[in-house]
Image (cartoon, rainbow, N blue to C red):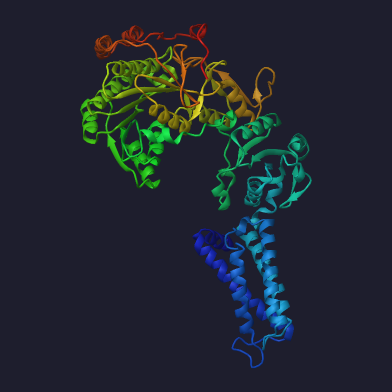
Amino acid sequence: MPLTKTANLLLDLPRPVKRAVALVFDAFLCVLTVWLAFWLRLDEWLPLSGHPQWRPEWAALAAVTVALPIFITFGFYRAIFRYAGWQASLTVVRAMALYTVIYATVFSLLRVPGVPRSVGLIQPMLLFLAVAGSRLLLRFWLGGMYRTILARGALPKAMIYGAGRAGQQLAAALSTSLEIRVVGFLDDDAGLHGQTLNGLPVYPPDSLPELVRIEGVQEVLLAMPSASRQRRHEILESLRAQHVTVRLLPGVVELAQGKVAVSDLREPEIEDLLGRAPVPPDAALMERNIRGKVVLVTGAGGSIGSELCRQIARLEPERLLLVEHSEYALYALDQELRRGGFEATRLVPLLGSVRDAARMREILQTFRPQTVYHAAAYKHVPLVEHNPAEGIRNNVFGTQIVAEAAREAGVADFVLISTDKAVRPTNVMGASKRLAEMVLQAMAAAGGSTRFTMVRFGNVLGSSGSVVPLFRRQIKAGGPVTLTHPEVTRYFMTIPEAAQLVIQAGAMARGGEVFLLDMGEPVKIAELARRMIELSGLTVKDAEHPDGDIEIRIVGLRPGEKIFEELLIGDNPEPTAHPRILKAREEFLPRATLEARLAELQNVLASGDEAAIRQALVTLVPGYRPAKNDEEITEKRIGFAQPQS
């Protein structure tokens, strides 16, 4: 127990302190091995107070002076003892070889008075044994090997896919784990097959089925940080049928620092499963409406709003206005951005609701932004379906309030963050977002100095309500994984990519356009669930496999949910300067007509009659038809143009 406490105390020391301790310890070994070399040569212990004939202090001073610079140059104090592998041992051998040549030359060939020539050969050998042995003992002790040697035999076996530097570092970092036992590498390089790296054999990937069957391998750790997303996708697809759990390497920085634990290995994200590579952003488009300008983001604390703020802050606006009605979300974002080192950006956190016309007018008149990104919205379909009046007040009239305040303040560019659910909506949320688009289209058509534009896209990965975390929780709980319908498909995009495309689309605006983000191919949610189950080392329980592990259960569509999502109402998309951005001009009501009907909608909202509210939306929003059941939703899809991509 005292040894464990001492080990933990050492491990908790700051990294610079640990390096200093190691350096002092090596200096002590230099002195100690000189003293032992004299004893072996003379067969007597020399007194520490000095000797009239022999000069061990000269030999010790030379040992420290020569050894420590060599050790520093060879990176002895950058390595982490408890994760040191064969490469670290080879470094010790090389450094000691150089030390031996220099030290032996000085004391064996040049002859120094008071130092026997044999000491020049004996001391380097003793120092090599001391340095190498001390590191092995420290690795044994600090790494907890004294507790784990017996236990590791029963641990789950894992293969590391990728025998490069990252894979070898991962193997070293997990060599003392009490949760998993790495038994070999898989690698595509035929030149490595049959070799041994860090004491572990290297196999071709097609050997995995045999390793699973004979060796009992249960997990594959993918350690290829430089591989493209498409290549990771291909590897994951090849592993699906092997009934092994698949996890991916954590950040390279954490690996290099030796901080990897089994809990740090991440499960495949949907980006890995889909394999679609993002298009690099156009720097000129990214900067056009931001650099050196005052920029305002509403809904700044939300999934998209916060990522917009991160992207905008990197582009060095004169000032970034964060408008958010949630105090906690605003505080968290403000602190994150300030910690992120965006000193050149003047961040202004502003509490306020987009439904508060006086507050919005005050903010816009005070700060006079040139660019506004309106991301504030209620976006969860079931919640808005159950709270239609609040959803419309926020999504429609909140947009109208901010847009009118922006026009009055002379804003140059106003960008609405819209959704694919605005296309032929079957739910209140989608209808409210289409109506918000129509408000801006009418304002753009009325003329003025403000360019109003809309950017429409589908589901973003990692946003609140994302299906992937839900499936993951259900798989960990043993199932079932719940789907609303076996044919449901969705478009997916990462939050950073969506935010970048929003900024670039807004920079191309001339006023009144609806920009559509190319979301790639739609994803069948049932297939996504199946992939996640299989990459967890489990099987799907269905009619063909009644003994499977996890059932996929169909629970029925939620109120207002579509089976298919679309991005375009018409069939006239136009290309733009960006390969992932299309634009369209879609029909809308004249401003006078729209404002009269919005006034009527306000009166209906005040009545609280949900049936009347939905009927008012049917009148206002072309194509809105509240769905009542699966058959009606499927019927709505028939005859419509396929989504553009």
Q: Could you tell me which quadrant the N terminus lies in?
A: bottom right
Q: Is residue 188 left or right of residue 417?
A: right
Q: In the displayed structure, would residue 5 be above or below residue 542?
A: below
**x, y percent for residue 439:** 31, 17
**x, y percent for residue 465:** 45, 27
Q: Nearer the viewer, residue 162 or 228?
A: 228
Q: Is residue 538 left or right of residue 429?
A: right
Residue placed furthest toward the bottom: 52
Residue at point 38%, 18% (across, down): 429
Q: Nearer the viewer, residue 18 or 577?
A: 577
Q: Is residue 398 left or right of residue 472?
A: left
Q: Nearer the viewer, residue 553 or 535?
A: 535
Residue at point 46%, 18% (across, down): 574
Q: In the displayed structure, would residue 447 be above or below residue 147?
A: above
Q: Is residue 81 visible?
A: yes
Q: Quarter-wise, where is residue 221 in the image? A: top right
Image label count: 0
**x, y percent for residue 285:** 42, 32
Q: Quarter-wise, where is residue 537 in the image? A: top right
**x, y percent for residue 459:** 47, 25
